[in-house]
Image: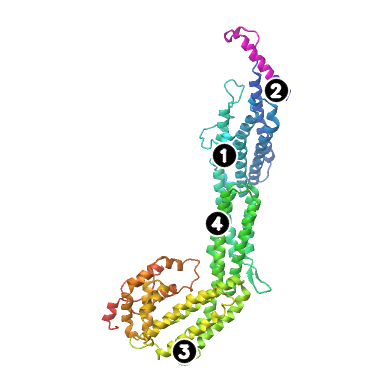
């Protein structure tokens, strides 16, 4: 080969020397004529390169011609076409390193081969996908779409690395004829026009990148659909239940979810290059679908105490598994810093959902713990028997004993961290339960002259004892859970404040009501709820002064609003999916007063504001104070 090329070059130099010895105008009279050997050789090489590429694809088509199943035959043919195209593109480097050195640099053999490969391969692939617009892309399988995306990335990387000038022409819009091999030679035919060759390579490169975009979009749509179907099946299916030797409850949910994710991620990772942007997008999409399904399916796992505990453990394990999957991807792939940041952001969103849901599930146990408590003491609390006969705060003791029994189960069912979260919720739930029972008594009390209790002083003593019993129980847990102390202080403050306000209303103490109303408002942080709650406390022990205390709170309104300005986001926070229902005092009060039928000296519009803020239509029947005065109630 080298000798042949040198002979052509010697012949070309002889031709040039002969022409230099004779005048150009005299050349037609000369009897000696030279053939343009280099031009002929280049033309033949170019043609042979094209035939080489066509022969590879011809073999592919012939091999698949006798396929029995038409659909399978088409799929197999597409796969074979990509395999052949990969083989030809891989030979670009071989031609540059092993063949091009046999030729003078100005022959640009690697350019001729690359141009032929680009032309032949793009032509074949465009035919397979139904034209440049990819009309047949929906007919391809997911793995074929992945292979197509991977091949285009391989082609682009190879061409741009070999010819850096092509990388700078991403915006070229030059048209080309798919059926015709591009003419790359200068007018003399003796050398390759590098500008023309570069433009043609750039055009094919950019056209295929558009196909890459279309295939990637189709693949991502298909991945989204597949993820949704698979995850739906997993979440709706039955999951094996387990209990470890130390009592921890779990199910197979974590393994089931991540086995599905592993199948998808493994397929994607094996088909795409380790630094593909499409790989990053696909991984983020899978994470996003896992997050979406978890958001919609979480509550379905919280059916009773044991399922809440199992779900909490499962969600915690899913959070840990998410971190492991991401680290495996980082270890096996070659992501850029930007890609790593994108993947970390996506995985953090998923991880945060799992972690938050684990806490949510652990704290949701309060619903099933207070269900029997409410059934056992809800009707009796603040009743006549509670006031007159249960001198040792037996109902509050029943509450704490029940909590103690359930806590023994929780210690076995969940880990130490989630146990603390569950106990936090029991503190809040205890306070909310106690206040709810108190407000329900105010709702039932329709006497506007006499106290709800036979003896206000005795009732206040019982309340004080109840608070001490509950507080003592939770204080006993602080040694093992030091952080619980702050929760106890915060939650029980409202009980002591309400007790003090009722003592003031009943004239048992001479403290200034304004001070404690301010403290109460800081906890409730809603002026309408504060007015309603203070009014209810007076209605229980001194209903004749309810109107006066309403007027007192209204006179303090500017001060209260200055301390805690109106904040509509508080209601949104309470209704957020991360907030466990039944643990927020303001939420309980809002729902209670929206549904309340008791008439109060409230200005028109207060309930409407609550309904709007808390997103409730409500069935409340409160009237403004003027209507109540006319009815002779105040």
Quarter of the image where one finds residue 201: top right
Residue for badge 1:
208
Q: Earlier in the sequence, mark 4 or mark 1?
A: 1
The percent coordinates of residue 264 (x first, y second) are 62, 54
Q: What is the C-alpha distance between the residues marked 3 and 1?
A: 82 Å
Which residue shows up at 63% across the image and 21% down it?
Answer: 39
- Write the start and end of the magenta stretch as one range: 8-32
Taking depth in this image into account, of 185 and 618 the one nearest to the observer is 185
The percent coordinates of residue 161 (x first, y second) are 61, 37
Considering the numbered disc 2 on the image, is that residue within a helix, a strand or a loop? helix
Is residue 225 in view from this perspective? no
Give the numbered dot on residue 5: 2
Residue for badge 4:
288
Residue for badge 3:
386
Dominant secondary-structure state across the stretch colored magenta: helix
Label 1 crowd bin: few (<14), some (14–19), many (20+), radius 10 Å:
many
Label 4 crowd bin: few (<14), some (14–19), many (20+), radius 10 Å:
some
């Amino acid at each position: 080969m080298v000798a042949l090329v040198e002979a052509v070059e010697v012949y070309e130099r002889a031709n040039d020397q002969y022409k230099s010895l004779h005048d150009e105008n005299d050349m037609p009279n000369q009897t000696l004529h030279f053939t343009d050997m280099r031009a002929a050789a280049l033309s033949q090489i170019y043609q042979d390169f094209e035939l080489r590429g066509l022969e590879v694809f011809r073999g592919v088509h012939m091999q698949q011609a006798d396929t029995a199943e038409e659909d399978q035959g088409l799929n197999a043919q597409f796969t074979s076409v990509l395999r052949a195209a990969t083989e030809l593109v891989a030979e670009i480097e071989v031609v540059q390193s092993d063949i091009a050195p046999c030729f003078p640099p100005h022959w640009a053999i690697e350019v001729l081969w690359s141009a032929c490969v680009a032309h032949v391969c793009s032509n074949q692939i465009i035919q397979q996908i139904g034209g440049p617009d990819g009309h047949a892309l929906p007919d391809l399988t997911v793995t074929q779409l992945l292979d197509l995306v991977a091949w285009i990335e391989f082609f682009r990387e190879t061409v741009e690395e070999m010819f850096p000038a092509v990388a700078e022409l991403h915006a070229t819009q030059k048209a080309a004829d798919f059926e015709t091999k591009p003419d790359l030679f200068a007018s003399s035919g003796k050398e390759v026009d590098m500008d023309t060759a570069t433009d043609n390579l750039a055009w094919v490169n950019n056209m295929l990148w558009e196909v890459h975009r279309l295939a990637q979009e189709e693949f991502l749509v298909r991945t989204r659909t597949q993820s949704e179907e698979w995850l739906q099946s997993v979440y709706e299916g039955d999951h094996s239940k387990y209990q470890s030797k130390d009592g921890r409850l779990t199910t197979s949910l974590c393994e089931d979810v991540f086995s599905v994710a592993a199948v998808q991620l493994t397929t994607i990772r094996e088909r795409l290059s380790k630094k593909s942007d499409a790989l990053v997008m696909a991984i983020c999409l899978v994470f996003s679908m896992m997050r979406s399904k978890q958001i919609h399916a979480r509550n379905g796992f919280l059916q009773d105490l044991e399922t809440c505990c199992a779900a909490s453990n499962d969600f915690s394990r899913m959070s840990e598994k998410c971190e492991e999957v991401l680290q495996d991807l980082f270890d096996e792939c070659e992501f850029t810093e930007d890609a790593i940041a994108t993947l970390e952001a996506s995985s953090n969103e998923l991880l945060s959902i799992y972690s938050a849901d684990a806490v949510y599930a652990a704290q949701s146990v309060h619903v099933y713990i207070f269900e029997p408590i409410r059934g056992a003491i809800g009707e009796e609390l603040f009743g006549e028997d509670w006031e007159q006969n249960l001198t040792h705060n037996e109902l509050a003791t029943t509450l704490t004993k029940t909590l103690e029994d359930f806590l023994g189960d929780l210690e076995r069912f969940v880990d130490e961290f989630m146990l603390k979260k569950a106990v936090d919720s029991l503190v809040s739930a205890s306070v909310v339960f106690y206040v709810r029972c108190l407000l329900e008594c105010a709702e039932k009390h329709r006497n506007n002259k006499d106290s709800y209790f036979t003896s206000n002083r005795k009732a206040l003593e019982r309340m004080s004892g109840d608070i001490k019993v509950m507080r003592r129980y939770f204080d006993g847990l602080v040694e093992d859970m030091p952080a619980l102390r702050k929760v106890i202080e915060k939650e029980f403050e409202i009980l002591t404040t309400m007790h003090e306000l009722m003592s003031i209303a009943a004239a048992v103490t001479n403290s200034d009501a304004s001070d404690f109303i301010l403290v109460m408002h800081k906890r409730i942080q809603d002026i309408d709820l504060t007015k309603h709650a203070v009014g209810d406390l007076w209605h229980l022990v001194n209903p004749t002064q309810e109107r006066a205390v309403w007027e007192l709170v209204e006179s303090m309104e500017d001060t209260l609003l200055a301390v805690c300005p109106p904040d509509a986001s508080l209601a949104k926070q309470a209704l957020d999916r991360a907030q466990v229902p039944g643990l927020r005092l303001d939420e309980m009060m809002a729902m209670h007063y929206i549904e309340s039928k008791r008439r109060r000296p409230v200005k028109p519009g207060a309930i409407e504001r609550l309904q709007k803020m808390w997103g409730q239509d409500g069935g409340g029947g409160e009237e403004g104070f003027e209507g109540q005065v006319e009815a002779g109630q105040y």
